[in-house]
Image (cartoon, rainbow, N blue to C red):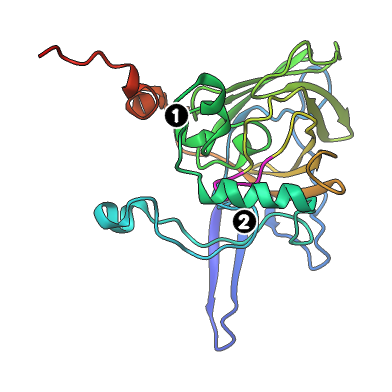
């Protein structure tokens, strides 16, 4: 696939046309995508296997946000700065309950704080990403790391490069979550060409982003993966949590197939990066 850029005129409009061997691929003015017939597996369903990645900045903030300095600008300079970005929340608003919005703000103010006085409070303070905990759903999908979809008739696996997080989507043996977990329990089904994944059974510790947006143990996420070209999926997720939000709300953005030759997931085992942060109080002190 190649890209043709039709320059920037006086209006500041940049027109990009993506083309493949079968013709031009572009989103139509109505917001709909041209018909696309995806490749199919032995079961007749679309084959979504491959390595995918999001190129949004929602891991910083789900909503519109300005560029900002990182945690240690006095030593890291621009290395630690966070880019500006457009939000992925439809309607541009997260419908918090008033008391939950206050906690969201506290989360943002203390996102770099890790209380190490007990295991329970260690989970409850600071951004879980800071501590290399599993990122949860849907956050794992829009972190700045690729992930791989491995597909069979009974199961679909999603393997994330970040922290080696793994999801198993059960396609024909749907059950309630046997216990709460960081990545939840996922049951999947097909609606035409769209993979629909219904996930619940979450621990209440994961966040949606670095801005402190969060959920409770009542979280339910319904995701939709729709192929619209050989190189793109449209990802949508409807988020419901009556303890935190007044109504369900939705995010959406494209996922891009990684096309490099011999592309593969690499290792981002961040546990060693966090050991000093989390466990330095347990280090044996030298005797005098």
Say whether residue 267 is left or right of residue 140. left
The residue positioned farthest toward the left in the image shown: 288
Measured in 3D between alpha carbons, the distance from the residue under mark 2 to the one under mark 1, in whole angstroms, is: 22 Å
Q: Quadrant of residue 237?
A: top right
Query: Looking at the picture, how far across and down is residue 244, in whole percent?
Result: 78, 42
Magenta-colored stretch includes residue 255: no
Q: Quadrant of residue 209?
A: top right
**Mark 2 or mark 1, which has the lower sequence index?**
2
Dot 1 alpha-carbon crowd within 10 angstroms: few under 14, some 14 to 19, many 20 or more: few
Front residue of this view, candidates 37 and 139: 139
Magenta-colored stretch includes residue 212: yes
Query: Looking at the picture, how far across and down is residue 288, in whole percent?
Result: 10, 14
Front residue of this view, candidates 209 and 280: 280
Q: Which mark is residue 262?
A: 1
Q: Is residue 55 visible?
A: no
Q: Which one is closest to the eye, mark 2 or mark 1?
A: 1
Say whether residue 278 is left or right of residue 119. left
**Contact (Cβ within 8 Å) of mark 2 with mark 1:** no
Relative vertical location of residue 9 with respect to residue 244 in this rendering, above or below: below
Q: Is residue 190 visible?
A: yes
Magenta range: 209-214
Residue at position x 63%, y 30% in the image: 205
Main SS of residues in magenta: loop
Residue at position x 86%, y 49% in the image: 246
The residue positioned farthest toward the bottom in the image shown: 10
Q: Secondary structure at mark 2?
A: strand
Q: Secondary structure at mark 1?
A: loop
Query: Which residue lies under the disc numbered 2?
Result: 19
């Amino acid at each position: 696939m190649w890209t043709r850029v039709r320059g920037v005129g006086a209006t500041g409009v940049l027109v990009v046309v993506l083309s493949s061997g079968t013709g031009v691929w572009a989103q139509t003015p109505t917001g709909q995508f041209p018909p696309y017939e995806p490749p199919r597996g032995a079961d007749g369903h679309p084959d979504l296997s491959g390595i995918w990645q999001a190129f949004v900045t929602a891991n910083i903030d789900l909503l519109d946000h300005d560029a900002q300095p990182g945690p240690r600008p006095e030593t890291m300079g621009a290395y630690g700065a966070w880019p500006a970005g457009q939000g992925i929340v439809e309607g541009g608003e997260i419908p918090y309950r008033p008391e939950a919005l206050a906690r969201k703000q506290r989360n943002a103010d203390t996102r770099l704080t890790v209380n190490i006085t007990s295991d329970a409070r260690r989970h409850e303070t600071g951004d879980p990403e800071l501590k290399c905990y599993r990122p949860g759903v849907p956050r794992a999908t829009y972190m700045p790391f690729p992930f791989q979809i491995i597909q069979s008739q009974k199961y679909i696996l999603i393997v994330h490069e970040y922290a080696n997080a793994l999801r198993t989507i059960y396609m024909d043996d749907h059950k309630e979550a046997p216990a709460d977990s960081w990545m939840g329990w996922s049951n999947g089904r097909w609606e035409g060409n769209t993979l629909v994944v219904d996930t619940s059974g979450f621990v209440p510790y994961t966040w949606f982003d670095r801005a402190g947006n969060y959920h409770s143990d009542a979280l339910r996420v319904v995701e939709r993966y729709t192929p619209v070209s050989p190189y793109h999926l449209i990802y949508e997720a409807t988020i419901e949590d009556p303890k935190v939000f007044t109504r369900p709300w939705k995010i959406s953005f494209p996922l891009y197939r990684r096309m490099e030759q011999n592309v593969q997931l690499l290792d981002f085992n961040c546990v060693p990066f966090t050991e000093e942060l989390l466990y330095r109080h347990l280090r044996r002190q030298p005797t005098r």
